[in-house]
Amino acid sequence: MSSQDKRPTGRQALPAGPAGAAPKSVAARALRILDTFDSEHYELSLSDISRRSGLPVATCHRLIRELVEWGGLLRTGGRYRIGHKLWSLGLLSESHHGLAELAAPYMHDVLFLTKHVVNLFVLDGAHALLLERISGTQPGPALHRVGDRLALHASAGGKAFLAYGPPELARAALANPQRLTPHTVIDPTRLRRELEQVRRKGYAMTLEEAVEGAHGIAVPVTAADGGVIAALGVVTVGTRPRPAGIVPVLQIAARSIAREAGRLAA
């Protein structure tokens, strides 16, 4: 087989025929560049994007520069990832917007009762996506923005997804966990024990694992069929949270959100 006959498999190769033909419009080429990103390829180099899109490097370089200027892509060193502009637009989708909207009143209840910043997460591939955030005037500066993606192994919401999600999700997340702070738990054996505790206690907790000085508690928002549709949590800065006073409030709110989501889907 010649080098010209060797083609990468899976998402690395575009289908042959009309669907894989070089797009003629600038918009189509830009969309093809964006389509190279997915949950397993959330950070790519210029050569990665060129190979996965089937477009010349020069074309990719020019369009990527424009996408970065617009906010559709974010450059970190010599690599690129989806920018906040696209995350903001994605949050306007009916499913995400509807969930955030129906959860908001219950999140306000949690804020009122706990006086802590309240976060609502949805699973986004290998990350926990911050879908909604409710805060008052006293909780302090925001540690994360709506649209941010947090590591599953280092966030309370992420650990809730790992504990109650499919086994393959935890296997992938625990295969090579990255240290984000000196307190991040990266030992797979210890993380598995933590996930067992989450399932036993009904909540997940992190202590300065994603951001130094910040602690989190989260519970799953579970649908009638047992699937986890979201994770609801609070974050504290400086002060370690007390689960006894927070978890029951989160669980009541989570059940209410799940009930409303079920009605929305019916």
Image (cartoon, rainbow, N blue to C red):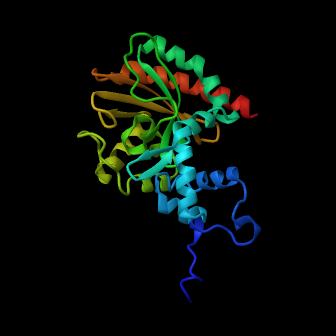
Q: Quadrant of the C terminus?
A: top right
Name the residue located 35 percent from the left edge and 22 percent from the top edge: 236
Query: Residue 134: x, y in percent?
Result: 50, 19
Query: Residue 174: x, y in percent?
Result: 38, 53
Q: Position of 159 compared to 73: left or right? A: left
Name the residue located 27 percent from the left edge and 22 percent from the top edge: 238
Q: Quadrant of the N terminus?
A: bottom right
Nearest to the observer: residue 205 or residue 88 = 88
Nearest to the observer: residue 141 or residue 154 = 141
The residue furthest left is 182
**One can see residue 106 in this view:** yes
Q: Position of 70 compared to 224: left or right? A: left
Query: Residue 244: x, y in percent?
Result: 37, 21
Query: Residue 69: x, y in percent?
Result: 53, 40
Nearest to the observer: residue 174 or residue 73 = 73
How many marks overall? 0
Nearest to the observer: residue 243 or residue 132 = 132
Q: Is residue 105 above or below residue 176?
A: above
Q: Is residue 172 above or below residue 20?
A: above
Q: Position of 146 compared to 96: left or right? A: left
Q: Position of 28 compared to 3: left or right? A: right
Q: Is residue 27 above or below residue 116?
A: below
**One can see residue 124 in this view:** no
**Quadrant of residue 137 within the rendered picture:** top left
Name the residue located 56 percent from the left edge and 38 percent from the top edge: 70
Name the residue located 34 percent from the left edge and 34 percent from the top edge: 206
